[in-house]
Protein backbone atom coordinates (compact mmCIF):
# COMPACT_ATOMS: atom_id res chain seq x y z
CA UNK A 1 0.00 0.00 0.00
CA UNK A 2 2.12 2.86 -1.30
CA UNK A 3 -0.56 5.37 -0.36
CA UNK A 4 -0.49 4.40 3.32
CA UNK A 5 3.30 4.69 3.39
CA UNK A 6 3.38 8.04 1.65
CA UNK A 7 0.69 9.50 3.91
CA UNK A 8 2.50 8.36 7.04
CA UNK A 9 5.75 9.98 5.89
CA UNK A 10 3.98 13.19 4.91
CA UNK A 11 2.00 13.47 8.14
CA UNK A 12 5.13 13.05 10.22
CA UNK A 13 6.91 15.82 8.35
CA UNK A 14 4.09 18.40 8.32
CA UNK A 15 4.60 21.45 10.49
CA UNK A 16 1.91 22.64 12.85
CA UNK A 17 -0.73 24.97 11.50
CA UNK A 18 0.29 28.60 11.31
CA UNK A 19 -1.68 31.18 13.28
CA UNK A 20 -2.13 33.53 10.31
CA UNK A 21 -5.76 33.50 9.20
CA UNK A 22 -6.57 33.70 5.50
CA UNK A 23 -9.77 35.77 5.35
CA UNK A 24 -12.62 34.95 3.02
CA UNK A 25 -13.26 38.28 1.32
CA UNK A 26 -16.49 39.04 -0.48
CA UNK A 27 -16.24 38.88 -4.26
CA UNK A 28 -12.86 37.13 -4.15
CA UNK A 29 -11.93 33.46 -4.48
CA UNK A 30 -9.97 31.72 -1.73
CA UNK A 31 -6.40 30.89 -2.81
CA UNK A 32 -4.50 28.09 -1.07
CA UNK A 33 -1.36 26.09 -1.69
CA UNK A 34 -1.25 22.29 -1.91
CA UNK A 35 1.44 19.70 -1.27
CA UNK A 36 3.10 17.67 -4.01
CA UNK A 37 4.66 14.39 -2.96
CA UNK A 38 6.15 11.34 -4.61
CA UNK A 39 8.69 10.41 -7.21
CA UNK A 40 8.55 8.46 -10.47
CA UNK A 41 5.24 6.53 -10.54
CA UNK A 42 3.91 7.47 -7.09
CA UNK A 43 3.03 11.13 -7.51
CA UNK A 44 0.05 12.63 -5.70
CA UNK A 45 -1.26 15.99 -4.55
CA UNK A 46 -2.47 16.57 -0.99
CA UNK A 47 -4.49 19.13 0.95
CA UNK A 48 -4.07 19.71 4.69
CA UNK A 49 -7.12 19.30 6.94
CA UNK A 50 -6.56 21.11 10.23
CA UNK A 51 -9.99 21.10 11.86
CA UNK A 52 -12.98 18.74 11.82
CA UNK A 53 -15.91 19.72 14.02
CA UNK A 54 -14.36 21.24 17.13
CA UNK A 55 -11.20 19.11 16.96
CA UNK A 56 -7.91 20.61 15.87
CA UNK A 57 -6.13 18.05 13.70
CA UNK A 58 -3.19 17.89 11.31
CA UNK A 59 -4.03 15.34 8.60
CA UNK A 60 -3.43 15.31 4.90
CA UNK A 61 -5.94 14.08 2.35
CA UNK A 62 -5.47 13.07 -1.26
CA UNK A 63 -6.73 15.92 -3.45
CA UNK A 64 -8.81 13.75 -5.77
CA UNK A 65 -10.53 15.07 -8.89
CA UNK A 66 -11.68 11.55 -9.77
CA UNK A 67 -14.07 11.05 -6.85
CA UNK A 68 -16.68 13.11 -5.05
CA UNK A 69 -16.79 13.65 -1.29
CA UNK A 70 -14.48 13.91 1.70
CA UNK A 71 -13.64 10.74 3.61
CA UNK A 72 -11.81 10.68 6.93
CA UNK A 73 -10.71 8.00 9.36
CA UNK A 74 -12.76 7.75 12.56
CA UNK A 75 -9.55 7.36 14.58
CA UNK A 76 -9.01 10.34 16.91
CA UNK A 77 -11.96 12.14 15.29
CA UNK A 78 -14.68 10.49 17.38
CA UNK A 79 -14.27 8.30 20.52
CA UNK A 80 -14.26 4.50 20.27
CA UNK A 81 -17.53 4.60 22.19
CA UNK A 82 -19.09 6.17 19.06
CA UNK A 83 -17.25 4.30 16.27
CA UNK A 84 -14.56 1.66 16.58
CA UNK A 85 -13.13 -0.97 14.23
CA UNK A 86 -16.39 -2.93 14.46
CA UNK A 87 -18.52 0.02 13.36
CA UNK A 88 -20.91 2.32 15.19
CA UNK A 89 -21.47 1.81 18.92
CA UNK A 90 -24.33 4.25 19.44
CA UNK A 91 -28.08 3.69 19.19
CA UNK A 92 -30.58 5.85 17.36
CA UNK A 93 -30.36 7.72 14.06
CA UNK A 94 -27.48 10.02 14.94
CA UNK A 95 -25.19 11.36 17.64
CA UNK A 96 -23.29 14.64 18.01
CA UNK A 97 -19.73 14.47 19.36
CA UNK A 98 -16.80 16.90 18.97
CA UNK A 99 -19.07 19.11 16.89
CA UNK A 100 -19.60 16.30 14.38
CA UNK A 101 -23.04 14.85 13.63
CA UNK A 102 -22.54 11.13 12.95
CA UNK A 103 -25.53 9.35 11.43
CA UNK A 104 -26.38 5.65 11.31
CA UNK A 105 -26.46 5.72 7.48
CA UNK A 106 -23.81 3.16 6.56
CA UNK A 107 -22.15 2.80 3.15
CA UNK A 108 -19.09 1.38 1.40
CA UNK A 109 -16.91 3.55 -0.85
CA UNK A 110 -14.72 1.80 -3.42
CA UNK A 111 -11.55 3.14 -5.04
CA UNK A 112 -9.87 1.38 -7.95
CA UNK A 113 -11.13 -0.56 -10.96
CA UNK A 114 -13.51 -3.41 -11.71
CA UNK A 115 -11.03 -6.15 -10.79
CA UNK A 116 -9.33 -4.61 -7.76
CA UNK A 117 -10.95 -1.96 -5.59
CA UNK A 118 -10.00 -0.85 -2.09
CA UNK A 119 -13.10 -0.37 0.07
CA UNK A 120 -13.80 2.01 2.93
CA UNK A 121 -16.62 1.09 5.35
CA UNK A 122 -18.20 3.94 7.24
CA UNK A 123 -21.04 6.37 7.95
CA UNK A 124 -22.44 9.65 6.70
CA UNK A 125 -21.58 12.56 8.98
CA UNK A 126 -21.76 16.36 8.97
CA UNK A 127 -19.13 18.75 10.34
CA UNK A 128 -17.50 22.14 9.83
CA UNK A 129 -14.02 21.71 8.34
CA UNK A 130 -10.90 23.82 7.94
CA UNK A 131 -8.23 23.35 5.28
CA UNK A 132 -4.87 25.10 5.49
CA UNK A 133 -1.65 25.94 3.76
CA UNK A 134 1.66 27.43 4.93
CA UNK A 135 0.20 30.92 5.29
CA UNK A 136 -3.28 30.45 6.73
CA UNK A 137 -6.57 28.63 6.43
CA UNK A 138 -10.18 28.78 5.26
CA UNK A 139 -13.29 27.08 6.64
CA UNK A 140 -16.69 25.76 5.60
CA UNK A 141 -19.46 25.62 8.20
CA UNK A 142 -21.26 22.33 7.51
CA UNK A 143 -19.90 19.71 5.15
CA UNK A 144 -21.28 16.20 4.58
CA UNK A 145 -18.39 13.76 5.00
CA UNK A 146 -17.84 10.01 5.16
CA UNK A 147 -16.25 8.70 8.38
CA UNK A 148 -14.69 5.29 7.78
CA UNK A 149 -13.72 2.64 10.33
CA UNK A 150 -12.44 -0.24 8.19
CA UNK A 151 -10.48 -0.69 4.97
CA UNK A 152 -10.46 -3.81 2.80
CA UNK A 153 -7.41 -4.36 0.59
CA UNK A 154 -8.38 -4.30 -3.09
CA UNK A 155 -5.73 -6.89 -4.02
CA UNK A 156 -5.98 -9.45 -1.21
CA UNK A 157 -9.60 -8.90 -0.18
CA UNK A 158 -8.47 -8.84 3.45
CA UNK A 159 -8.84 -6.20 6.12
CA UNK A 160 -5.77 -4.01 6.44
CA UNK A 161 -6.21 -3.78 10.17
CA UNK A 162 -9.30 -1.70 10.67
CA UNK A 163 -8.73 1.99 11.28
CA UNK A 164 -5.49 2.97 9.54
CA UNK A 165 -4.47 6.21 11.16
CA UNK A 166 -5.84 8.33 8.30
CA UNK A 167 -3.99 6.33 5.67
CA UNK A 168 -6.76 6.64 3.08
CA UNK A 169 -8.30 10.03 3.76
CA UNK A 170 -9.69 11.40 0.49
CA UNK A 171 -10.63 14.98 -0.40
CA UNK A 172 -12.82 14.21 -3.40
CA UNK A 173 -13.53 17.35 -5.44
CA UNK A 174 -15.18 15.70 -8.46
CA UNK A 175 -18.51 17.09 -9.74
CA UNK A 176 -21.95 15.69 -8.98
CA UNK A 177 -22.59 13.68 -5.82
CA UNK A 178 -21.08 10.57 -4.29
CA UNK A 179 -22.25 7.25 -5.72
CA UNK A 180 -22.76 5.89 -2.17
CA UNK A 181 -24.89 8.74 -0.83
CA UNK A 182 -26.42 11.64 -2.75
CA UNK A 183 -26.04 13.84 0.35
CA UNK A 184 -22.25 13.89 -0.14
CA UNK A 185 -20.70 16.28 -2.68
CA UNK A 186 -17.33 17.98 -3.11
CA UNK A 187 -16.31 19.69 0.16
CA UNK A 188 -15.25 22.70 -1.89
CA UNK A 189 -18.88 23.28 -2.88
CA UNK A 190 -19.73 24.20 0.73
CA UNK A 191 -17.47 27.25 1.00
CA UNK A 192 -19.35 30.55 0.97
CA UNK A 193 -18.62 33.58 -1.22
CA UNK A 194 -19.93 37.03 -1.90
CA UNK A 195 -21.76 38.30 -4.96
CA UNK A 196 -20.15 37.52 -8.29
CA UNK A 197 -18.33 34.33 -7.25
CA UNK A 198 -19.58 30.96 -8.54
CA UNK A 199 -19.08 27.74 -6.58
CA UNK A 200 -16.27 25.70 -8.12
CA UNK A 201 -12.49 25.55 -8.21
CA UNK A 202 -9.54 26.20 -10.50
CA UNK A 203 -6.37 24.14 -10.24
CA UNK A 204 -3.10 25.57 -11.52
CA UNK A 205 -0.56 23.51 -13.46
CA UNK A 206 1.48 21.30 -11.12
CA UNK A 207 5.21 21.97 -11.49
CA UNK A 208 6.92 18.69 -12.32
CA UNK A 209 10.07 19.51 -10.35
CA UNK A 210 8.05 19.83 -7.12
CA UNK A 211 7.37 16.08 -6.90
CA UNK A 212 10.00 14.44 -4.70
CA UNK A 213 10.50 11.91 -1.91
CA UNK A 214 9.66 14.60 0.66
CA UNK A 215 6.48 16.70 0.66
CA UNK A 216 6.81 20.01 -1.16
CA UNK A 217 4.50 22.93 -0.51
CA UNK A 218 3.50 24.78 -3.69
CA UNK A 219 1.68 28.06 -3.14
CA UNK A 220 -1.40 29.28 -5.02
CA UNK A 221 -2.24 25.98 -6.72
CA UNK A 222 -5.92 26.03 -5.72
CA UNK A 223 -8.52 28.75 -6.22
CA UNK A 224 -11.82 27.99 -4.48
CA UNK A 225 -14.60 29.97 -6.14
CA UNK A 226 -14.73 31.11 -9.76
CA UNK A 227 -14.93 34.61 -11.20
CA UNK A 228 -16.76 35.52 -14.40
CA UNK A 229 -13.43 35.45 -16.25
CA UNK A 230 -12.79 31.91 -15.02
CA UNK A 231 -16.07 30.77 -16.56
CA UNK A 232 -15.04 31.76 -20.09
CA UNK A 233 -12.90 29.58 -22.33
CA UNK A 234 -10.05 32.11 -22.39
CA UNK A 235 -6.76 30.35 -21.76
CA UNK A 236 -8.35 26.90 -21.47
CA UNK A 237 -9.24 23.94 -23.64
CA UNK A 238 -12.84 23.18 -22.65
CA UNK A 239 -14.33 19.70 -22.39
CA UNK A 240 -17.94 18.71 -21.75
CA UNK A 241 -18.07 16.23 -18.87
CA UNK A 242 -20.10 13.02 -18.95
CA UNK A 243 -23.38 12.47 -17.15
CA UNK A 244 -24.27 9.42 -15.06
CA UNK A 245 -27.69 8.28 -13.89
CA UNK A 246 -26.10 7.88 -10.44
CA UNK A 247 -24.22 10.86 -9.05
CA UNK A 248 -25.00 13.25 -11.90
CA UNK A 249 -22.07 14.86 -13.73
CA UNK A 250 -18.83 12.85 -13.52
CA UNK A 251 -15.14 13.62 -14.08
CA UNK A 252 -15.00 11.56 -17.28
CA UNK A 253 -14.28 13.30 -20.58
CA UNK A 254 -15.66 11.82 -23.84
CA UNK A 255 -12.60 11.26 -26.00
CA UNK A 256 -11.09 9.37 -28.90
CA UNK A 257 -8.12 7.03 -28.48
CA UNK A 258 -5.90 5.88 -31.31
CA UNK A 259 -3.91 2.81 -30.33
CA UNK A 260 -2.21 0.05 -32.32
CA UNK A 261 -3.85 1.11 -35.55
CA UNK A 262 -7.33 1.34 -34.09
CA UNK A 263 -9.39 4.43 -33.30
CA UNK A 264 -12.06 4.02 -30.64
CA UNK A 265 -14.42 6.22 -28.63
CA UNK A 266 -13.64 6.28 -24.93
CA UNK A 267 -14.30 8.08 -21.66
CA UNK A 268 -11.17 9.31 -19.90
CA UNK A 269 -11.29 9.94 -16.14
CA UNK A 270 -9.70 13.21 -14.99
CA UNK A 271 -8.26 11.72 -11.81
CA UNK A 272 -5.54 13.34 -9.71
CA UNK A 273 -6.05 10.59 -7.10
CA UNK A 274 -4.60 7.85 -9.32
CA UNK A 275 -0.99 8.87 -9.77
CA UNK A 276 0.53 6.90 -12.59
CA UNK A 277 -1.50 4.26 -14.39
CA UNK A 278 -3.25 4.39 -17.76
CA UNK A 279 -5.90 1.73 -18.39
CA UNK A 280 -7.29 0.98 -21.83
CA UNK A 281 -9.94 -1.73 -22.05
CA UNK A 282 -9.68 -3.63 -25.35
Image (cartoon, rainbow, N blue to C red):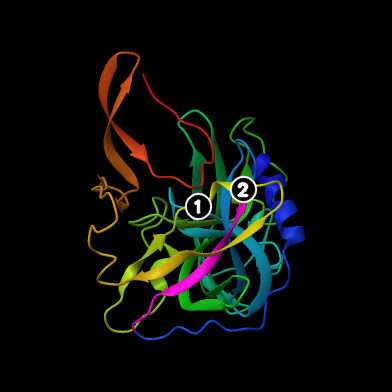
| Residue 4: x %, y % from top left | 68, 46
Question: Which residue: 66% across, 63% down?
Answer: 59
Judge whether 111 appears above or below 280 on screen: below
Precedes in sequence: disc 2 or disc 1: 1
Q: Which residue is mark 1?
A: 206
User: Label 1 near label 2: C-beta < 8 Å?
Assistant: yes
* Circle 1 SS class: loop
Image quadrant containing the C terminus: top left
Left or right relative to 210: residue 262 = left
* Circle 2 SS class: loop
Residue 164 appears in view: no
Q: Residue 211, labelled with which disc?
A: 2
The chief SS type of the magenta part is: strand
Magenta includes 251? no
Q: Residues within 10 Å of mark 1 (few under 14, many from 20)?
A: some
| Residue 141: x %, y % from top left | 47, 80
Magenta includes 30? yes
| Residue 281: x %, y % from top left | 38, 23
Question: Which residue: 58% across, 77% down?
Answer: 53
Judge whether 182 appears above or below 277 on screen: below
Label 2 – label 1 distance at C-alpha:
9 Å
Q: Residues within 10 Å of mark 2 (few under 14, many from 20)?
A: many
Residue at the right extreme, as displayed = 12
Question: Which residue: 60% across, 65% down?
Answer: 48
Q: Which residues are magenta?
A: 27-37
Closest to the observer: 210 or 149?
A: 210
Question: Which residue: 56% across, 77% down?
Answer: 137
Closest to the observer: 171 or 45?
A: 45
Judge whether 182 appears above or below 250 on screen: below
Amino acid sequence: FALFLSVAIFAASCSKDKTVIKPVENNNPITLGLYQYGADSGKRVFVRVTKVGTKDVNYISVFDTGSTGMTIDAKDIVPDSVINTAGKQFSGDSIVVNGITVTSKQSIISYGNKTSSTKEYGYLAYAPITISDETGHASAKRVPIFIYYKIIDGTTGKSVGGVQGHGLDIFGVGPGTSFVNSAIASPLSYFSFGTGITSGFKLAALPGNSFSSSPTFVSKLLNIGLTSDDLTSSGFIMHTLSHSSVGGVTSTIPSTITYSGQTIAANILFDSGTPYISTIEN
